Image (cartoon, rainbow, N blue to C red):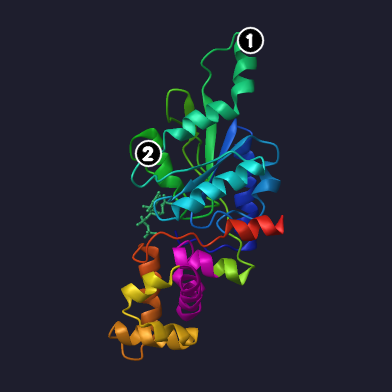
Amino acid sequence: ATIQWFPGHMAKAKKQVQEKLHLVDIVLEIVDARLPLASRNPILDQIIQQKPRLMILNKADLADPALNAAWINYFKQHGLPAISIDSQHNHNVQQIEKQAQVILADKIARQQARGIKNKPIRAICIGIPNVGKSTILNRLVKRNVAITGNHPGVTKKQQWLKAGKSLELLDTPGILWPKFEDPLVGKKLALTGAIKDSLYHADDVALYALAFFKQYFPERLQKRYRLTEADFELTDPDLLLKITADLGLKDDYERASERLILDCRKGKLGRYTLDQVTEAAAND
Ligand code: G4P
C-alpha cells in the first residue's frame, strides 16, 4: 500500500472507522506479529473504546515463535484476547471465528434467552496498511474479494460477506495510520515493509537491522554474509561496509542497505520479532 497520510486523511479515516463501528459486534485488530506494538494505530483504543476486540498477530510465520506466544500472553494479561495466525498459508485462520464466539459468549447467550437464534456475529478488520487485512478477509470468505475503495477517504456502500458459519465481515477493512512520530517505530515499520521506501533512508534502517541482529542473532548475520568473529568488533557502519563488500557491491553502501532490508523482509535472516515483550512489560 502506498498511502500518504496527511491530517485530512487521518481525520477522514478515523471518521469512517467510527461510522463502521456502529455496525459491528467485534473488532478484529490486525497487527504484524513481528511488531505487535509498533504496527498498532496510536489512537485505536480511543476510537473503539469498549467495543469487544480480538487482537490478531498476523504474519506469525515470519515472527519468532516463542515471542508470538509471549505477546499473546502479554495482551491477554492486558485484557485483550489475542491469537497468532499466518493468513498467507492459511494457518490458524479458523481460530478467528471460534475466538469471536468465546468473546461474545455472554451476548450470544442473552440473545438466545430472548429467542434470537443464529444471529451472525458481525466483524470488521482494522489495522495499518500492509498488516494483511485483505489477505485475512479473502481467507475468511474463501474467495478473492476485489477490495475496491481500499483506501482511506474512498466511500462506497457497505456489504456483509459470509466469513464462516456464524461470522459476517464488512467488505472493506478499516485502514488507520501507523505511529510515525517515533523514529524507532519508523525504522521497524520500514524494515518489515509496512511503510513506503521513499519515507526513510535505507542506511538508517539497515543500521538498525544490523544492531538488532548483532544483539539477538549474530550467527545468522555471520552465516548469510560470511562474517568472521573479528567483524563483530567493528562499528555498525564498518560492519555494513564489510557486508557491502561481501555482497560484491564495492562501496555502494546504499544498495547494500537495500539488500539487507530485503533479506530481512523476505525472512532470509530467519524469523524475528522486533518488539520485545520484556521492554513493553518494563514500561507498564
Ligand atoms: P493490507 O490489506 O493490510 O494492506 O495487507 P495485504 O493483505 O495486502 O498484505 C500485505 C502483504 O503481506 C502481502 O504481500 C501479503 O501477501 C502479505 N501477507 C499477508 N498476510 C501474511 C502472512 O500471514 N504471512 C506472510 N508471510 N505474508 C503475509 P505482497 O502482496 O507480496 O505485498 P508486499 O510483500 O509487496 O508488500
Residue occupied by mark 2: 139
Image quadrant where one finds the N terminus: bottom left
Q: Residues within 10 Å of mark 1 (few under 14, many from 20)?
A: few
Residue that lies at the very extreme toward the front in this rendered image: 229
Q: Secondary structure at mark 2?
A: helix
Decide whether the magenta segment is chiefly helix, strand or loop.
Answer: helix
Name the image quarter holding residue 162.
top left
Which residue range is magenta in the image? 187-216
Residue 110: image location, x then y, percent: 65, 16
Q: Residues within 10 Å of mark 2 (few under 14, many from 20)?
A: many
Determine the residue positioned at 61% across, 47% down: 74
Residue occupied by mark 1: 113
188 or 14, nearer to the observer: 188
235 or 132, nearer to the observer: 235
Q: What mark, if any, has residue 154 been given in the picture? A: none
Name the image quarter holding residue 224.
bottom left
**Which of the two labelled residues, at mark 1 and mark 2, occupies the earlier sequence position?**
1
Residue 202 counted in the magenta span = yes
Residue 271: image location, x then y, percent: 40, 59
Residue 156: image location, x then y, percent: 50, 41
Determine the residue positioned at 48% across, 83% down: 236
Residue 43 is left or right of residue 118, and the answer is right
**Rendered view: 66 above or below 191:** above
Residue 16: image location, x then y, percent: 60, 45
